[in-house]
Image (cartoon, grey):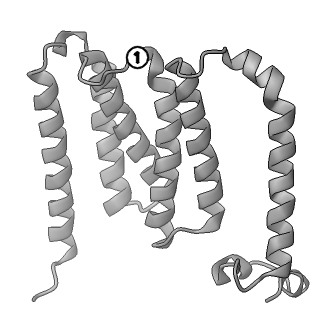
Amino acid sequence: MKKITVPVLNALLAAGVALILSGLILILRFSAGWDNVPVLSVLAMIFGALVFYAAMTIIHWAVLFFSGLLLFCLGICMTFAFSGLLPLGPEHLWPIGVILCGICLILTCIFKHQKIRMVYLFPSLLILTLGFIFLLFSLEVIKISFSSFMSKWSPSVLIFIGASLIAVFLWQRNFKEFFPYDKDELSDLTDEEKEFYGD
């Protein structure tokens, strides 16, 4: 099979993005709540798709990839929430935005490094966890208010997180073969730091 040239690949990506946008807009247009959709959410979706396309084809910056993907996903969520297709009200969108940030961060890592690296994975998982917790409070699955929950449980959460970080450090120092560093992550370290981390 003959290798596809870069201009053809870029045209395929453009067509794919345009078809996804067209399909989403048609779904929204034929929904009962089309009149409730703010123009800003549709513009966010379109602008996010354009920035995503530019990051994939022209500029190749991870921050543009992240921003475009996040804007596109937030635009979809906003338009679907305002149109009534998403069973959540617009007031529940901010925890979904936090969850989308975590997902987009993992996808940005894959875009930039062609694999998942720990330096992106831990913050992504933390952001995703916080987003799901915020969503539970926002949907009132957890009946107490977030402020009273935090005032009561935040010291315990801090102690648990601190103990987990110490356990990870000790585990990594003693069992390096089960929890190795990425060789890429060690490339920026000095010789003394490499010796300390066991490379």
From the top left corner, tell me how far across and down residue 143 is, in percent: 60, 16
- Quarter of the image holding residue 49? top left
Observer-nearest of 149 and 48: 149
Q: Pointer 1: what residue?
A: 90
Q: Quadrant of the C terminus?
A: bottom right
Rendered residue at 82%/57% (across/down): 165
Residue 53, compared with residue 11, is above or below; it is above
From the top left corner, tell me how far across and down residue 161 is, in percent: 80, 48
Observer-nearest of 14 and 114: 114
Residue 38 appears in the picture as rendered: no
Query: For this view, does 175 lie left or right of residue 17?
Result: right
Residue 189, compared with residue 138, is above or below; it is below
From the top left corner, tell me how far across and down residue 80 is, in percent: 27, 25
The kind of residue tagged 1 is Pro
Query: For this view, does 80 lie left or right of residue 120?
Result: left
Rendered residue at 25%/17% (across/down): 84
